[in-house]
Image: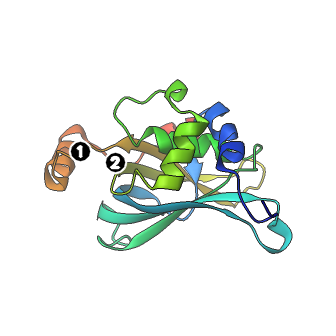
Amino acid sequence: MNDTTINALDVLGAVADAKAEVASSYIDPGTHILELEEQKLTRGSGTNKKCVYYIGDLKVLWSKDEVHAPGTTKTYVENLNDDWEQGPGRLKAFAMAMGPNMAEEDITKEDLAEMVNSQCCKGFRVLCHAWAKEKKTKPGEYITKYRWSYVDPSVSIEDFVASLRNKGGSAPSANEANDA
């Protein structure tokens, strides 16, 4: 194995052991239904050569946010070496949304490796509630936080959106976002 080969089991063990978190990048605040198109692990470049990133391409199926037109692709990226920023835990929360009623203990590094290597979750749908939150350590700088949920593939997007509207589904309130 050369130094650019990534052993998925080694890296994904940190994800399986992490506490699920609610933030990441590249998806703007709002409420979105997304479909997983492709995912991979990749090593950083330049000064980040030691970092391993999870990259998932997600097709927008529906969005309350006009910036995310249906059919466009958004990229979800996590730094899996970044324990301080809880990247492994955020990926775990995303992985938990791949199935109904998944618990943290349901996520193993073997399952995660299978998920990434075989692309077995391609076409799975997730609901993403995203909101901006000011960094405590850097006032004036914001990060986007996410709450991922499973979307039943047997339910049409139209029916799912109608059920969201009936439940008052939207991005978390300011109070909920401050608690996250």
Residue that mark 1 sits on: 164
Residue that mark 2 sits on: 170
Residue type highlighted by circle 2: Ser
Instruction: Name the residue located 31 percent from the left edge and 61 percent from the top edge.
Output: 64
Q: Is residue 22 visible?
A: no
Q: Residue furthest right?
A: 47
Camera-nearest residue between 48 and 29: 48
Instruction: Name the residue located 42 percent from the left edge and 30 percent from the top edge.
Output: 102
Please tell me how crowded label 1 is: few (under 14), some (14-19), or many (20+) other residues with Cα within 10 Å. few
Which corner quadrant of the image does residue 72 belong to?
A: bottom left
In the displayed structure, 82 sits above or below 93; it is below
Q: On the picture, is 108 further left or further right than 149? A: right
Q: Secondary structure at mark 1?
A: helix
In the displayed structure, 14 sits above or below 121; it is above
x then y, percent, for residue 163? 18, 43
Q: Quadrant of the C terminus?
A: top right
In the displayed structure, 36 sits above or below 167; it is below
Camera-nearest residue between 120 and 55: 120
Check whether the beta carbons of the residues at disc 1 and disc 2 lie within 8 A of each other: yes
x then y, percent, for residue 54? 61, 57
Residue type highlighted by circle 1: Leu
